[in-house]
Image: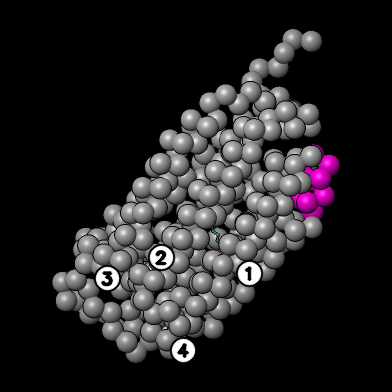
Amino acid sequence: AGALPIDSVLAADVTQSQMFEYLQEDALLNSSLWINIALAGLSILLFVYMGRNIENSRAKLIWVATLWVPLVSIASYTGLASGLTLGVLQMPPGHALHGGELVLADGTTIDDGAITMWGRYLTWTLSTPFILLALGLLANTNFTKLFTIIVADISIMVTGLAAALTTSSYAMRWFWYFISVSFFLVVVYILLVEWPEDAKAAGTAEIFNLLKLLTVVLWFGYTIWWALGNEGLALIESVAITSWGYSIFDILAKYVFAFLLLNWITDNESIIAEHTTFESGTAAPS
Ligand code: RET
């Protein structure tokens, strides 16, 4: 009685300090977070520098969207590394970790306990739309397709968060997962079918197709990894290994992706300018 609602979501009564200490004890897990804080920091500096001479309004918008990927990432990983955005859930019957015990650094044991890094799903909600905005601008797509893919993308992450946080029923976890995958297929359709056509017309097909492939393959990677990891089938029971998987996907899907995109934009701004139909800043007097 009188408990905050969050207690019933994050079932086990674990404090932020206990989560922080858990990370200090597990060097493999902690390093999966700090590597990304370091790389996101370096990426931010590099990307600011790379974009310093961009003039065209669409190229500039691609640059800003791309820059926000590591900016969100550094916040995301700081949330995890500080113990703020991860917690312990008690898994329902049917889940591989049901019947087990999670032991924290201070010896506290939690029946059916599983660590959940829910902050990841939360911040993917914020970072992945920037990836798609950048790709859509590169393809010079229309507003309708851009809106559709971004809404579908946000829906993937929010329902993925729901899959991770559901503890009432094992079947309901997978039902959320199924909903999330359905939204993912909308994203895949636009990336593989709609945008390549747009990119062709915009003269950006070559770089678009490379980044499209990178994105689709890696995004399927996240999807499969969730199913295999400690929150899904728990074929990979280790939180540290599960976390490292996401961290490696993040390095490729965020920093490597963003570098390839910015590198191309700065070398080919004239191609972007040729097809740009909007301007930034104040309108010129006519
Ligand atoms: C979840 C589980 C539920 C089903 C699906 C998922 C897909 C996640 C994806 C994440 C991409 C993240 C990126 C982050 C970079 O900032 C939520 C794992 C479909 C596609 C690119």
Cα separation between marks 4 and 2: 25 Å
Establish if 247 lies above or below 114.
above
Q: Which residue is mark 3?
A: 13
Q: Amino acid at mark 1?
A: Val
Q: Nearer the viewer, mark 3 or mark 2?
A: 2
Q: Give 80 or 53, whichever is nearer the viewer.
A: 53
Indicate the secondary structure of the residue bearing disc 2. Answer: helix
Whichever of callouts 1 and 3 sits on the residue coming sooner in the sequence is: 3
Query: On the image, which quarter does residue 268 sit in?
Result: top right
Quarter of the image that includes the C terminus: top right
Q: Earlier in the sequence, mark 4 or mark 2?
A: 4
Residue ID at (61%, 67%): 220
Please state the extent of the stretch shown in magenta in the rendering.
194-202
Q: Label 1 CB, ligand 1: below 8 Å?
A: yes
Mark before the other along the chain sequence, 1 or 2: 1
> Spatial distance from mark 1 to mark 3, Cα to Cα?
31 Å
Mark seen at residue 181: 1
Q: Earlier in the sequence, mark 4 or mark 3?
A: 3
Residue 117 to residue 273: above or below: below
Residue 125 appears in the picture as rendered: no
195 inside magenta stretch: yes
Identify the residue at horizontal 36%, vertical 76% (top origin): 238
Residue 83 place in picture, x, y as percent: 29, 58
The residues tagged by marks 3 and 2 sit, at their Cα atoms, a distance apart of 26 Å
Which amino acid type is marked by label 3?
A: Asp
Closer to viewer: mark 4 or mark 2: 2
Q: Mostly what secondary structure, the magenta segment?
A: helix
Residue 244 badge:
2
Name, please, the residue furthest toward the left.
Answer: 106
How does the figure colour the protein chain or chains? one colour
The amino acid type of the residue labelled 4 equals: Gly
